[in-house]
Amino acid sequence: MAKRETWATRVGFLVAAIGSAVGLGNLWQFPFKTAGNGGAAFVAFYLIAVLLIGFPAMLAEFVLGRRTHRNAVDAFTELGHRQWRVLGAFAVVTGFWILSYYNVVGGWVLRYIVGSAQGAYFDAPAEYFGAVSAGPEAILAQLVFLGIVVGIVALGIEDGIEKATKVMVPSIVLLMGALAVWAVTLAGSGEGYAYFLTPSLDAMVANAGTAIPFAVGQAFFTLSLGMAIMITYSSYIGEDDNLLVDGGVIVVVNTLIGILAGLVVFPILFANGIDPALEGGASALFVAVASGFGGLPLGEVIGVIFFGVVALAALSSAISLMEVTVAWANDNYDVSRPVLAVGIGVALFVLGLPSAWNVSYLTWFDNIAYSLLLPLSVLLMVLFVGWVLAGDAVAELREGTDGVETFGPIWLWGLRLVVPLLVLVTLGLGVYELFLAPEPTFFAPFSGS
Ligand code: PFF
């Protein structure tokens, strides 16, 4: 079998991982969940979840990938724990499941770039969204989005993913930054910032039941954890980087982009007299924000730039998830990468058809992933690294740090006790919301209403 690929540069790995993390979760869900759950107080909550749970869990995935240089399933065999492969397989399946509907939403975004240029949704945004988000139009858009993703992944790690994300990620940062600066000039900017970032402890307490699992779920989703992405990406690391530094950079940049997105979105809404509290879920971006563009000078241009940024973010996330399955197939079968990518693309397309046909399927897929699959996957992974891999994990983390890090033992006990405990609480609340609550208040990223 051919030699396994690696990233050409350390920056290549970092940028690709940032591209994976920065996605629809940041640009769309983070601002709205923050606003709806206590503003700055929620941001604090989320930051704690990222630090206490997300960051250690990310390091756990890094260690698995870099130590084995294998896909997420065979990594366990490589470590001498063959019976745990099922755990890797679960993460891969979780990722596959998520990508099936993420492609559909990616398709909507592409469609909205065209719609913005034409001003197509300016007059009747809700009707436009209804027309393009489901049925044949959505299926076609899904196909286009998936085609781009397959094309990039088919080109390989260095020539495909690394090259693409090196252009995409800086573009996202620059364009989002430019939009945030432009948003300062809007009449509603002050009100928008206040809504987004003024702390409200009362709102936090009142919403705690959903805000806590959401903060934890958001930390997983936004950092691309539990879907085997970070295992796969770190398996292509050539030399030993300092994983602590890499993880820190990814977490910080990812959080800043989420905040930047809020600084763009809320001024637009307030400038147009739209109440963000009434607009959760799918309609937040595609109806509420979109309708704001219609009321602004040069709305077409702003709309194209805005949805262009969202598209880049969605694409650089989707390719990371596609790579998870392609890596597994590539390590196991002597079939060329492009053929594998196309084959897996077809399977994803089929699994995504219900979501493209009707948004309520998409919501269902999303709820299952967010409340059940993701937390379970992260839980099993951290337990494995904490209790089974244990000392070997600490040794691996130490590689590339010039022997100076002393974080290892603390990290290990975090993975053994703190993270599982917090994830269990989240899982419990999620399962309750999903199956038992009299009036479920879903907190999944793409759920409607
Ligand atoms: N971190 C990504 C986001 O915030 O959108 C999560 C993700 C979802 C990555 C779906 C990849 C993907 F296909």
Image (cartoon, rainbow, N blue to C red):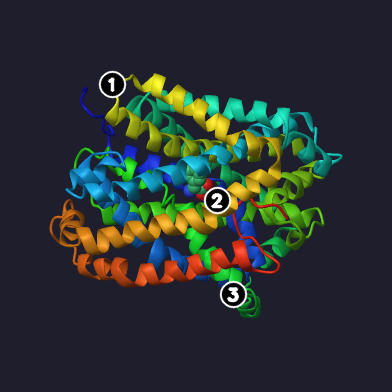
Graded by Cα atoms within 10 Å as few (under 14), some (14 to 19) or many (20 or more), the crowding at tag 1 reads few
Question: In the picture, which quadrant includes the C terminus?
Answer: bottom right
- In the rendered image, residue 20, in percent from the top left (x then y), is placed at 44, 43
Residue type at mark 3?
Ala
Q: Nearer the viewer, residue 135 or 161?
A: 135
Name the residue carrying label 1.
334
Label annotation for residue 208: 3
Tell me what residue is drawn at x 38 percent, y 41 percent: 15
Please name the amino acid that badge 2 sits on: Gly
Secondary structure of the residue carrying tag 1 is loop
Residue 206, image x and y in percent? Answer: 65, 78
**In the image, is residue 406 above or below residue 250?**
below
The yes-or-no answer for disc 2 within 8 Å of ligand 1 is yes
Type of amino acid under label 1: Asp
Residue at (17, 48) in percent of width and height? 80
Query: Residue 106, percent across and down?
Result: 60, 37
Which of the two discs, 1 and 2, labels the residue nearer the N terminus? 2
| Residue at 56% across, 35% down | 351
Above/below status of 284 relative to 125: below
Instruction: Name above or below for residue 204 compared with residue 126.
Output: below
Q: Nearer the viewer, mark 3 or mark 1?
A: 1
Q: Residues within 10 Å of mark 2 (few under 14, many from 20)?
A: many
**Given contact means CB atoms under 8 Å apart, are the residues at marks 2 and 3 in contact?**
no
Which mark is on residue 25?
Answer: 2
> Looking at the image, is mark 3 or mark 1 earlier in the sequence?
3
For the residues labelled 3 and 1, the Cα–Cα distance comes to 50 Å
Residue 43 visible from this viewpoint: no
Q: Nearer the viewer, residue 47 or 59?
A: 59
Between the C-alphas of marks 1 and 2, the distance is 35 Å
Pick the front one: 298 or 119: 119
Residue 410 falls in image quadrant: bottom left
